[in-house]
Amino acid sequence: MPHLPLDPSGTDPRKSRPIGKPHHTIFFAVRPTLEVTSGALEIAQFYRDTHFLTGPSRPSSVLNVTLNGIGSYRRLPDDVVFGAEQIAGAVRAEPFELVLDEVMSFLHPGQSQAFVVCSRQENQALMDLRRQIQDGLFKAGLPYNAGGHITPHMTLVYDRKTVLPEKLDQPLRWTIREFLLIHSIYGKSEHHVINRWPLLG
């Protein structure tokens, strides 16, 4: 299987599509706790009100911080899922804290902007987790995200309006204790957890 480098952000399901209309995307991610999810939705509602965003808040069930995309497909590929699970099982990392302290719009020319809560400070533990996944995908010949840097973020709203970067008075903060392989059904805001792996060191 040839190596298929994806867009470095690895977060926008409208990118890195094969020919035709894919319905399924697969990616590694971490998810917020219930408390952080509630805080994220409060942030989304506040900025929808103050910036007159008309797009709906993303459902709580799909909020995540993407680590690495593994492509988009017309049907869920069992071989790719199996390979990704084998790679994830070999990852070794300890729990770590993630802080998202800023909001902004990620610009997608000609499309709705992704309004996100994010951090532009490098989180070394998150980068190491992503690097292990990247290396495993590359060695297995599976799709992977090129580039070594990401901006950790959760997409809260898609909207045509742009929100300029703004620091949060109360950042979202939680301890990452696991990462997940997620199957997203494109266009339905529907995520299914394929598997999850605890961070045990």
Image (cartoon, rainbow, N blue to C red):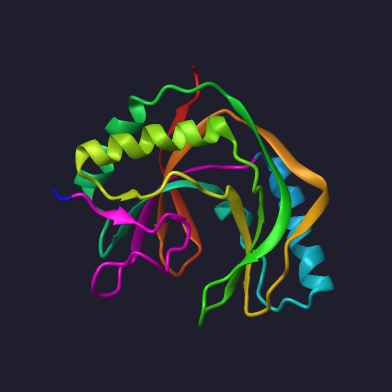
Q: Is-magenta flag for residue 7?
A: yes
All told, the count of numbered labels is 0
Q: Quadrant of residue 49?
A: bottom right
Q: Of all residues shown, which one is farthest toward the bottom?
A: 110
Q: From the viewer's perspective, is residue 119 above or below residue 123?
A: below
**Residue 81: horizontal and vertical position, in percent?**
28, 44
Of helix, strand and loop, which mostly describes the magenta segment? loop
The stretch of residues the image draws in magenta is 3-32
Magenta stretch: includes residue 12: yes
Q: Position of residue 139 (x, y in %)?
A: 22, 36
* Location of residue 55 in the rendering, given as x and y in whole percent from the top left corner: 66, 75
Residue occupying the point 77% across, 64% down = 45
Residue 122 relative to residue 48: left or right:
left
* Quadrant housing residue 181: top left
The image shows residue 71 at horizontal and vertical percentages of 32, 56
The residue shown at (41%, 35%) is: 131
Residue 70 or residue 128, whichever sits in front? 128
- Judged from this view, the residue extending furthest toward the top is 201
Question: Left or right: 58 with respect to 48?
Answer: left
- Lateral position of residue 9 relative to residue 16, left or right: right
- The residue furthest left is 1
Quadrant position of residue 62: bottom right
Camera-side residue of 190 and 178: 178
Residue at 48 percent across and 44 percent down: it is: 29
Residue at x 25%, y 75% (from the top left corner): 20
